[in-house]
Image (cartoon, rainbow, N blue to C red):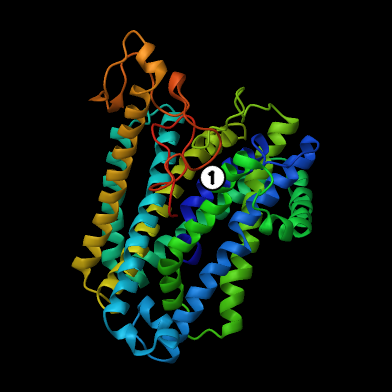
Amino acid sequence: MLFAAGMGIGLVFWGVAEPLSHYASPRPGVSGTDADVAGLALAQTYLHWGIHAWAIYVVVGLALAYAIHRRDRPVSIRWALEPLLGDRVRGRLGDVIDIAAIVGTIFGVATSLGLGVLQIGAGLEHIGTADSTVTLQVILIIGITALAVVSVATGLDKGIKWLSTVNIMMAAGILLYVLFTGPTLFLLREFVQSIGVYLANVLPMTFDVSAFAGAEGEAWQADWTTFYWGWWISWAPFVGVFIARISKGRTVREFVAGVLLVPTAVTFLWFAVLGGSALYRQLFGAGDLIGPDGVVDQEFALFSLLEGLPGGAIVSVVAMVLIVLFFVTSSDSGSLVIDMLGSGGDPDPPAWSRVFWASLEGAVAIALLVAVDCWHCARWRSSSRCRSAPSCSPCAWVSGGPSIVNTRPTCGRGEGRCGGNSPSIWRSTLRAGSRRSSTRWATVK
């Protein structure tokens, strides 16, 4: 449940895409041979997803677990701040704290839902089932949100726990499949070596804010590292509450080891195997995972990698099912936490309110998806290319989503590509997409 709630969809989406992106477009100041850049690409990915991320969850989760299980406080963020704020957490200030946690969780979960549905749509397009249009993505959000509603209505010990177990088993299966059908010996050696590169560079990378890299460095930091810290912080109330509730009976040492060390090690292995396989193929194989313009198809990267392995078409379908299940567990666990916060810390809120919050998260994801797609249309329509095109018409809902007649306003298709390998095209709301998507997701988680 910890992985399913904490990072599920993100790990699947970025497992291949992020190491490739850092290899294709390294952090300003990174140089060396292709092998050196590949090793630093994995180390940079570990920095974003490893100890630094889980440490944020540990701080919030441990404070909440102590308040809830040792001091018998309700399941609410405000009580973690009681030693600092005293009795003021019982009044308006406490309400403001919980409201901030609820809003952050809603948009954080909606962002991950967007990531998931973009990759599911990409997978369907990859196997030739359907084009990944906005209409398809909206339908997918509605359908999978309905599954999340059923799961959250059954409670923590049934639906969420069962789905989380299935998630981890399927993710482990894909991990082992890539490990043993790919360059196994290379991946094992690369895992050990990349850990060494990470340990040798973790302090410099942690404090490297690209101060001497000018505007390029500032933009890179905003697109990647700074954005990740914001993403993890936005999810901290949700994940902190969730892991605090399921950690009753653990010692502080067990809690820290279970939330910090074990997930970090598994996360490193995940990126070393999936990202390492992609880097191996790029360096020593077909070299077809990075486009000729140096841009990574981030939504399609996982499926492109699987396509080159034995039985990849079948495993691609399994990967899409895994994304759906991670979508459901992110939504239902987020809904449960939001409901507990909105119910004054009730650990077992009524089913109707859980259903409401799950539905609201899906609605927010749809609203952000549609709004950003039209934003791209407006941006393209106001560009000099559009004004000079002979048949450039306003954004209109046709054939499954906003489009421009005789043009493609979407990122990475034809004339309208509007980004590189960074995850931040619309940073204030959602989160990273790819050059072949009809949207770019960027934001809070």
Residue 382's x, y, as percent? 35, 23
Q: Residue furthest left?
A: 352
Tell me which residue sits at (76%, 48%) in the image. 190
Seen from the viewer's position, the closer of residues 286 and 64 is 64
> On the picture, is 353 further left or further right than 211?
left
Task: Identify whether 96 is placed above or below 366.
Answer: below
Tell me which residue sits at (45%, 49%) in the image. 322
> On the picture, is 194 further left or further right than 7?
right
Residue 56's x, y, as percent? 53, 68
Label 1's element? helix
Seen from the viewer's position, the closer of residues 4 and 238 is 238
Number of numbered markers? 1
Q: Quadrant of the C terminus?
A: bottom left
Residue 219's x, y, as percent? 56, 42
Q: Which residue lies furthest to the top in this view?
A: 390
Residue 181 in sight: no
Seen from the viewer's position, the closer of residues 282 and 387 is 387
Seen from the viewer's position, the closer of residues 356 and 163 is 356
Tell me which residue sits at (48%, 63%) in the image. 233
Task: Identify whether 125 is placed above or below 358.
Answer: above
> On the picture, is 141 further left or further right than 249?
left
Residue 203 in sight: yes
The residue where tag 1 is placed is 223
Task: Identify whether 185 is placed above or below 158.
Answer: above
Residue 72's x, y, as percent? 38, 90
Q: Quadrant of residue 50 in the image?
A: bottom right
Mark 1: give few (<14), some (14-19) or many (20+) Cα within 10 Å: many
For badge 1, the amino acid type reads Asp
